[in-house]
Amino acid sequence: DVKVTQSSRYLVKRTGEKVFLECVQDMDHENMFWYRQDPGLGLRLIYFSYDVKMKEKGDIPEGYSVSREKKERFSLILESASTNQTSMYLCASTTGSYNEQFFGPGTRLTVL
Amino acid sequence: DAKTTQPPSMDCAEGRAANLPCNHSTISGNEYVYWYRQIHSQGPQYIIHGLKNNETNEMASLIITEDRKSSTLILPHATLRDTAVYYCIVRLFYNQGGKLIFGQGTELSVKP
């Protein structure tokens, strides 16, 4: 089975902290994605990557950066966390742009 | 990607068929219809996708109207574990990195 894992299920950080969210997939997928999910707003794409060291901005990249040094790992970085970044963060991967995306369990981040 | 419209919520009796509608009146000829679902506190899960022919897999059936302006996801024998938010997504088969645009979805409650 495809497995997408995320480093934490729950995370609490303080305003101004640097936050790293890690995502690992074990199926050699080329494409990886970071979404955030908020009540009433649904899932929104933050960044995606279609190859190692490649990244593309999604719909809401402001305040975030990403890193993909290895094919299996895609990290989301909040350089200076703010309270409006409190959200559920979901990572996904796919073997091609047309194939189904496999999602991780999500990380619920609270910024105080 | 075309916009979709779904009812915000639906109920279904356990063991009965659940029919979830989706309107996508602005769909273009090379856009596919995808369905995902999200069970509470989990990441979204792919269900099925199609272009213009009806599709069936072990989870569900997808019925697309001849003019492709609407579709219906059918869960033939709903169980309590099918309680989830169901998302209908219309997207190009080969689109920008494979990103998905999620709407608000339909919250399906399967009741005993």
Image: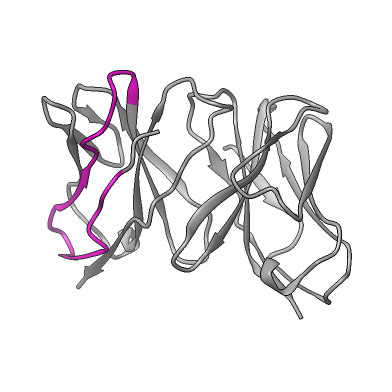
How far across and how far down the image is residue A108, in percent? 65, 67
Q: Which residue is drawn at 83% across and 77% down?
A: A14
Name the foreground residue: B1 vs B60.
B1
When the figure is inspected, residue B43 is found, relative to residue B2, above or below; the finding is below
Question: What's drawn in magenta, residue-wise?
Answer: B4-31
When the figure is inspected, residue A67 is found, relative to residue A71, above or below; the finding is below
User: Which quadrant of the figure contains the N terminus of chain A?
Assistant: top right
Q: Which residue is drawn at 21% across and 36% down?
A: B25
Say how the picture is coloured. Answer: one colour
User: Which quadrant of the figure contains the C terminus of chain A?
Assistant: bottom right
Residue A40 falls in which quadrant of the image? bottom left
How far across and how far down the image is residue A55, in percent? 74, 32
Name the foreground residue: B44 vs B27.
B27
Question: Was residue B15 drawn as part of the magenta stretch in this picture?
Answer: yes
When the figure is inspected, residue A7 is found, relative to residue A96, above or below; the finding is below
Residue B71 vs residue A2: left or right? Answer: left
Q: Which residue is drawn at 76% across and 41% down?
A: A74
Residue B29 falls in which quadrant of the image? top left
Q: Which residue is drawn at 40% across and 33% down?
A: B1
Name the foreground residue: A15 vs B53.
A15
When the figure is inspected, residue A77 is found, relative to residue A95, above or below; the finding is below
How far across and how far down the image is residue A21, in percent? 78, 55
Residue B64 falls in which quadrant of the image? top left
How far across and how far down the image is residue B79, in percent? 26, 60
Residue B75 vs residue B38: left or right? Answer: left
